[in-house]
Amino acid sequence: MRRGLEEQFNQEVENYRKALLYHARISDWETFKAKAGKMFDYVEAIEYSELERRFFTNFNVILIALIAIVIALFKVDFAVTPDLMRIKNVMILAGLGASSFELYFYLDYKIYMRVKTVYYPKRREKFIKNIENDFRAYVLQAEERKAA
């Protein structure tokens, strides 16, 4: 993530934290839950876009290498010397290995994102419940300190 976007993200999360703290202090738990849900959605959207950016950065580099291997295989006349035939075999094996890795990398990413989206509502509810419990405990501690 670029530095400017990172600072913007941190500022947005800090704004959500302040809003959550305010609503916890006044015991407005319904608004608190709505804000916590929005915070979760925001963080998930940023995480998803960052994962996608990193994935396609790596994916494109490997894809360019594969295209270069294919172009080399079609452009070079390997029948000129026996050494070039061995290089052709090495290039074919390297291309097969890279394309197998690329396929694995792509499928792994897609499966990860599918699982992540399937369990999104459960993770969201769990996040809201956990953060609500944390803030309730924080508010209770603050009230106990005031009373003491």
Image (cartoon, rainbow, N blue to C red):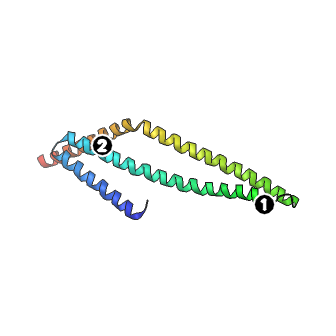
Report the quarter where the N terminus lies: bottom left
- Extreme residue in the front direction: 75
- Residue toward you, 77 or 20: 77
Task: State which tag comes first along the sequence, 2 or 1.
Answer: 2
How many labels were placed on the picture?
A: 2
Using residue 59 as the reference point, say whether residue 46 is left or right of it.
left
Relative to 76, is 27 above or below? above
Element class at badge 2? helix
Element class at badge 1? loop
The residue carrying pointer 2 sits among few (fewer than 14), some (14 to 19) or many (20 or more) residues within 10 Å by Cα, namely some
Residue 93 in sight from this viewpoint: yes
Residue at horizontal 88%, vertical 58%? 82
- Residue toward you, 5 or 122: 5
Residue of label 2: 37
Q: CA distance from mark 2 to mark 1?
A: 58 Å
Residue at horizontal 28%, vertical 55%? 14
Residue 148 in sight from this viewpoint: no
Q: Position of residue 116 (x, y in %)?
A: 45, 40
- Extreme residue in the bottom direction: 3
- Mark 2–mark 1 CB contact (< 8 Å): no
User: Residue 7's mark?
Assistant: none
Using residue 76 as the reference point, say whether residue 97 is left or right of it.
left
In the picture, residue 5 is in which quadrant?
bottom left
Residue at horizontal 38%, vertical 60%? 6
Q: Position of residue 137 (x, y in %)?
A: 24, 42
Which tag is nearer the camera, tag 2 or tag 1?
1
User: Residue 76's mark?
Assistant: 1
Amino acid bearing label 1: Val
